[in-house]
Image: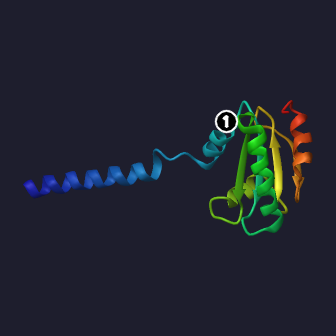
Amino acid sequence: MMKTILSYIFIGLALSVFTSGCTGGNASSEEKKESKKNSFLGKVTFIELGAATCTPCQMMQKVMLEMEKKFSNRINIVFYDVNTVAGKPYAYQYGIRVIPTQVFLDTNGNEYFRHEGYFPLEAVESILKLKGVE
């Protein structure tokens, strides 16, 4: 009798762990995208989609460092390495064709400009000025 009760308890616990892992607590990819987009709200966002092994992308890393120095808390700066498992979904999300690609989002999270290839700091600054970032 005691073995039967313990068996039912064990089965019940196993089922609750299994079902909660399958259906509960995990945000869908759409919810994650929306959460990520919401984290950018309130500031202009510069998104660099590239790869660590790409020469023009490496040149853009220097531009991004200068941007961080110059604009520090006034803009969001994000880099996605689209050659990694973690970064590949962003290549699809933003529909990139080549790397590097730069995407500019306004304070509401809407894309207002896009560029493909190396983009010098002066050009980035002129695009940021369109949204009042100086």
Q: Quadrant of the N terminus?
A: bottom left
x, y percent for residue 19: 40, 51
Q: Residue at x 33, y 53 (%)?
A: 15
> As rendered, which of 113 and 59 lies closer to the eye?
59
Circle 1 residue: 38
> As rendered, which of 44 and 33 lies closer to the eye?
44
Counting the numbered discs, the total is 1
Q: Residue at x 45, y 53 (%)?
A: 22
Look at label 1 and name its amino acid: Asn
Vertical position of residue 74 compared to residue 94: above or below: above
Q: Is residue 1 visible?
A: no
> As rendered, which of 53 and 49 lies closer to the eye?
53
Q: Residue at x 84, y 33 (%)?
A: 133
Vertical position of residue 74 compared to residue 53: above or below: above
Left/right of residue 17 with respect to residue 129 in the rendered view: left
x, y percent for residue 35: 62, 39
x, y percent for residue 125: 88, 41
> As rendered, which of 24 and 65 lies closer to the eye?
65
Colouring mode (rainbow / by chain / secondary structure / one colour): rainbow
Q: Is residue 39 visible?
A: yes
Where residue 134 sits, quadrant-wise, is top right
Where residue 97 sits, quadrant-wise, is bottom right
x, y percent for residue 96: 82, 58
